[in-house]
Amino acid sequence: MNIDMELVRRARDVLGTANTTDTVHGALAEVVRRAALRRLATRDWGMTLDELAEIRKGRAFAGE
């Protein structure tokens, strides 16, 4: 595997990782997380933004 070590160094700075392995794993995990968020963002939840806001409001106060 050929890896651009300058890109690894820059990613390490962004991710705050200590070594190349942790940096590559962290970067891969971030790619997977972003893809999941994109899928969620495009999903049809079958509710209006107002209905979603009401659900979120209820969760914000659930711990009090």
Image: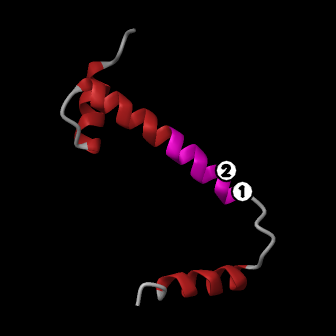
Q: Position of residue 16 (x, y in %)?
A: 22, 43
Residue at the spot 40% in from the left edge and 90% down from the top edge: 64
Q: Is 60 positioned to the left or the right of 48 in the image? A: left
Q: Main secondary structure of the magenta part?
A: helix
Q: Position of residue 59 (x, y in %)?
A: 53, 81
Q: Where 64 sits versus 12, above or below?
A: below
Magenta residues, as a range?
32-42
Q: Is residue 34 magenta?
A: yes
| Residue 27 - label | none
Q: Position of residue 17 (x, y in %)?
A: 23, 38
Q: Is 60 positioned to the left or the right of 53 in the image? A: left
**Residue annotated with mark 1:** 42
Instruction: Using the rendered view, name the quadrant where residue 52 is placed.
Output: bottom right
Instruction: Using the rendered view, name the quadrant where residue 1 is placed.
Output: top left
Residue at far right of view:
46
Instruction: Using the rendered view, name the quadrant where residue 45 is placed.
Output: bottom right
**Three-letter amino acid code at the position of disc 2:** Arg
**Residue annotated with mark 2:** 39
Q: Is 55 positioned to the left or the right of 30 in the image? A: right
Say what secondary structure mark 1 lies in: helix
CB of mark 1 within 8 Å of CB of mark 2? yes
- Number of numbered discs: 2
Say what secondary structure mark 2 lies in: helix
Q: Where 46 sits versus 21, above or below?
A: below
**Three-letter amino acid code at the position of disc 1:** Thr
Residue at the spot 58% in from the left edge and 53% down from the top edge: 37
Q: Could you give the CA–CA distance between mark 1 and mark 2, rounded to whole angstroms?
A: 5 Å
